[in-house]
């Protein structure tokens, strides 16, 4: 869809980008004993856009400048004066040009409009850039098919958490399902059209192109993922490395020596972290391990489970990266005549209500996704309102053993 914050300066499974200091704090999250986790600072890695470099062509009337708007929480925000400076005109001429008013020549108007495009500036952003302006709408783009999203518990709970905060602030959620290559343009249209006050970026990939592109246009945003993936944006994340290691060690303590995992898409940042940790931990414990990549859907989860159960060396325990794939594995196990948990142990991720509706009930790594969504949204409000928004870790997922995990079957003879 995740050990206290700051414990790992370089999370496993993520490829380093350009180093930049990212402030990290841990907000107080209530857990079973009402405790709170301590804060810290994280030396994250990311690409930070900065400054401007002018490239002058002496043979042309209009200069071209390569520059980006800085991070919305402290970097330079492109203004009408920047457009005027690039186009070589006054701010009043920019106003006339962008509103198609008389008073500037056609050639000058085109030069001004080109400068605005180069800087990613639109007239609606003038109103958006006012410090402390109350947010009205939050944008969320998810790269999932509509049918699949309707079955995936994580996003249903995550969006509910977002809405719980938006409702208190009389704000709205603008949601779009899109292909990955369309996400940047959707966010750009919303922001430059004054349709959103900020955005939430989910399913971060290693070297995610959304980060530099949306930072360049000055979109206030929060990344749902590790700071190493977030660039200049604040990040809210869960410690997938710690949770994955706990899951593996739990199954090993039950006696399992052949453990498999069905992961989400390999290019996702949190999938990479879980995969690296799973591989490292099983190697440390001397276990036989295998990871099969799926896409979080029931169909691919079933196929991945069949692939594992048809292998010459069948696993005695399987960890699934979401609840939906783990639920489908119960049916696949029955197809193979295997009893859960006596012949095969299953462990899910997130612990939605689905895990408690099956028989046996699924053991899971519990993640309070509703509170996670609310936390992300509160952090975005801090960004939009120019308050101190810092990257921080949410509560670490906790193990909830139920009826789907048990010691492995004893070998015959």
Image: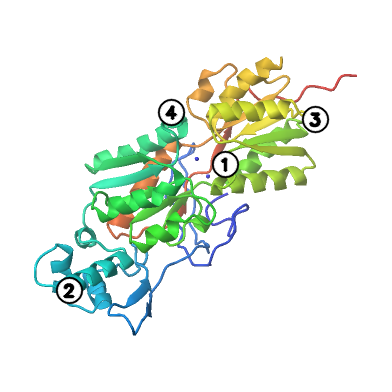
Name the colouring of the figure: rainbow
Which residue is under mark 3? Answer: 313
The picture places residue 231, in percent across and down from the top left corner, at 46, 61
Choose the circle earlier in sequence order: 4 or 3: 4
Q: Residue at x 53, y 63 (%)?
A: 45
Which residue is under mark 2? Answer: 91
Look at the numbered discs 2 and 4 and tell me whether their residues touch, using CB distance below 8 Å.
Answer: no
Q: Say what secondary structure mark 2 lies in.
A: helix
The picture places residue 403, in percent across and down from the top left corner, at 62, 21
Q: Which mark is residue 265?
A: 1
Q: Which mark is residue 23?
A: none
For discs 4 and 3, the disc positioned in front in the rendered view? 4
Residues packed near mark 4 inside 10 Å, few (<14), some (14 to 19) or many (20 plus)? few
Residues packed near mark 3 inside 10 Å, few (<14), some (14 to 19) or many (20 plus)? few
Which residue is under mark 4? Answer: 147
Choose the circle earlier in sequence order: 3 or 2: 2
Compared across the picture, whether 376 is left or right of 39 comes to: left
Choose the circle earlier in sequence order: 2 or 4: 2
Residues packed near mark 1 inside 10 Å, few (<14), some (14 to 19) or many (20 plus)? some
Q: CA distance from mark 1 to mark 3?
A: 24 Å
For discs 1 and 2, the disc positioned in front in the rendered view? 2
Choose the circle earlier in sequence order: 1 or 4: 4
Q: Say what secondary structure mark 1 lies in.
A: loop
| Quarter that holds the C terminus | top right
Q: CA distance from mark 2 to mark 4?
A: 48 Å
């Amino acid at each position: 869809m995740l050990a206290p914050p700051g414990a790992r300066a370089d999370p496993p499974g993520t490829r380093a980008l350009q180093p930049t200091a990212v402030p990290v704090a841990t907000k107080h999250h209530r857990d079973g004993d009402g405790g709170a986790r301590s804060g810290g600072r994280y030396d994250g890695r990311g690409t930070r856009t900065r400054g401007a470099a002018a490239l002058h062509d002496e043979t042309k009337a209009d200069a071209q400048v390569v520059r980006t708007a800085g991070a919305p929480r402290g970097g330079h925000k492109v203004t009408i004066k920047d457009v005027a400076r690039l186009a070589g005109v006054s701010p009043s001429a920019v106003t006339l040009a962008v509103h198609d008013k008389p008073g500037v020549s056609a050639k000058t108007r085109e030069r001004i409009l080109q400068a605005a495009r180069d800087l990613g500036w639109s007239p609606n952003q003038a109103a958006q850039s006012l410090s402390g302006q109350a947010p009205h709408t939050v944008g969320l783009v998810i790269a999932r098919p509509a049918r699949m999203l309707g079955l995936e518990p994580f996003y249903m709970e995550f969006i509910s958490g977002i809405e719980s905060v938006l409702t208190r602030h009389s704000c709205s959620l603008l949601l779009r399902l899109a292909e990955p290559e369309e996400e940047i343009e959707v966010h750009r249209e919303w922001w430059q059209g004054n349709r959103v006050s900020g955005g939430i970026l989910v399913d971060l990939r290693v070297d995610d192109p959304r980060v530099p592109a949306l930072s360049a246009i000055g979109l206030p945003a929060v990344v749902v993922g590790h700071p190493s993936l977030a660039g200049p944006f604040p990040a809210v994340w869960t410690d997938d490395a710690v949770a994955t290691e706990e899951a593996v060690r739990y199954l090993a303590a039950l006696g399992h020596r052949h453990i498999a995992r069905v992961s989400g898409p390999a290019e996702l940042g949190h999938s990479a972290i879980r995969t690296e940790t799973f591989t490292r931990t099983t190697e440390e414990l001397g276990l036989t391990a295998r990871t099969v990549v799926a896409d979080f859907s029931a169909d691919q989860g079933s196929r991945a489970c069949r692939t594992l159960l048809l292998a010459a060396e069948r696993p005695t325990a399987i960890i699934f990266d979401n609840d939906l794939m783990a639920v489908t594995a119960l049916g696949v196990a029955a197809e193979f005549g295997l009893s859960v948990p006596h012949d095969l142990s299953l462990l899910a991720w997130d612990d939605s209500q689905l895990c408690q509706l099956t028989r046996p009930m699924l053991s899971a790594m519990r993640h309070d996704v509703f509170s996670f969504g609310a936390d992300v949204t509160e952090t975005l409000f801090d960004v939009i309102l120019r308050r101190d928004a810092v990257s921080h870790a949410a509560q670490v997922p906790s193990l909830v053993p139920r009826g789907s995990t048990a010691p492995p079957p004893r070998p015959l003879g």
